[in-house]
Image: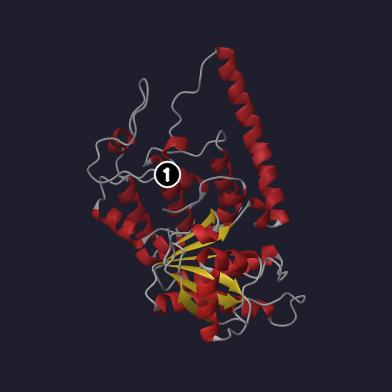
Amino acid sequence: MPLQIVRNDITLMDVDAVVNAANTDLQMGGGVCGAIFKAAGERELRQACDAIGRCETGQAVLTPGFRLLARAIIHTAGPVWHGGGRGEAKLLLDCYRNALLLAQDRGCESIAFPLLSSGIYGYPKEEALRIAAAAIGEFLREHDMDVYLVVFDRAAFSLSERLVGEVRSYIDEHYVAQHTSLQRKLRQAEIKPAYSGDAEMMDRETEPGSSTVAEAPGPAYSLNDIVRELDESFAQALFRLIDARGQTDVEVYKRANIDRKLFSKIRSNLTTYVPSKKTAVAFAVALELSLDETMELLARAGYTLSHSQKFDVIIEYFITNGNYDIFAINEALFYFDQPLLGA
């Protein structure tokens, strides 16, 4: 996936490069910096940093990864927050841009960032996240790289209080009552929910030539059975919509947070490819489809949006409010512990 938010220890990321939230003297510090020094090997990393000398705020330098899984460490010195009036935003943007350009120059195909400057440097987390998204998104529009934004725990991740409140209210209104009502009816009937499909299929893609997507109990059909009954496959409908909106393939797969290789596979298998649900939704978002149009596209892969799935309600909230920023949607999905869009 080109851009993914993950909850992990950045020192354990198996990527080509991890980014260190360094100080300008490239000395071992606290937080992310201290953790990276300890995991990489304090003595070896200190010697490599001493050989470089300094890294000015907003710039980026590279050392080997030593004992890390990552083969390289990109050190970038973020700005200290002084209220926003000393060019902090530009300097923080420069950190991401220069780190990404250095990674590309060294042939990296994957990179993991912490949320720079948001720890002891005091940058407000919501604003730091917005800048990270802007810088990474700008880079990915022109380049191919798997980029991870790594947060250690939920407390380290901040989402707009206004957005959280609005999404939570929408969930409460559209999900809780509906879900509770459904469970009550099932209990009264003394039955368990039949195969729902959506939750189990959220992360699964169907390879070309596969005979089934998933086995379902009782009379339920596989997604391939459903797709075969449609006049148009999911992939055929997708490319028809891309042409109708005058967009290019590159524009769409980048806005959908989809890997180029997967997109090429879809184009090569127009009648047999069946996406995971999160991939199908990602394309609907990239194409800025209305809710009805989204439902129609999802149906061609055997999916729907329902008020019994929290993921679905969050997607419905963003579409009905005309917000098609896939990173903003993924921020909200991450905050509410739901699968992220893309593939």
Q: Is residue 183 above or below residue 266?
A: above
Count of numbered labels shown in the rendering: 1
Q: How is the image coloured?
A: secondary structure
x and y percentages locating residue 205 in the rendered image: 35, 45
Residue 98 visible, this orientation: no
x and y percentages locating residue 145 in the rendered image: 41, 67
Residue shown at the point (51%, 66%) measured from the top left: 40
Viewport quadrant of the N terminus: bottom left
x and y percentages locating residue 191 in the rendered image: 51, 16
Tell which residue pokes out farthest to the right in this image: 83
Q: In the picture provided, is 226 more to the left or to the right than 330?
A: left
Q: For mark 1, give the secondary structure.
A: loop
Q: Amino acid at mark 1?
A: Asp
Tell which residue pokes out farthest to the front in this image: 43
Q: Is residue 241 above or below residue 312?
A: below
The residue closer to the viewer here, 267 or 330, is 330
The residue carrying mark 1 is 203
Residue 93, picture quadrant: bottom right
Number of other residues with Cα within 10 Å of mark 1, as a class: few under 14, some 14 to 19, many 20 or more: some
Q: Is residue 166 above or below residue 89?
A: above
Residue shown at the point (53%, 63%) measured from the top left: 39
Residue 265 visible, this orientation: yes
x and y percentages locating residue 294 in the rendered image: 46, 47
Q: Is residue 116 above or below residue 263?
A: below
The residue closer to the viewer here, 182 or 319, is 182
Residue shown at the point (29%, 33%) measured from the top left: 225
The residue closer to the viewer here, 246 or 81, is 81
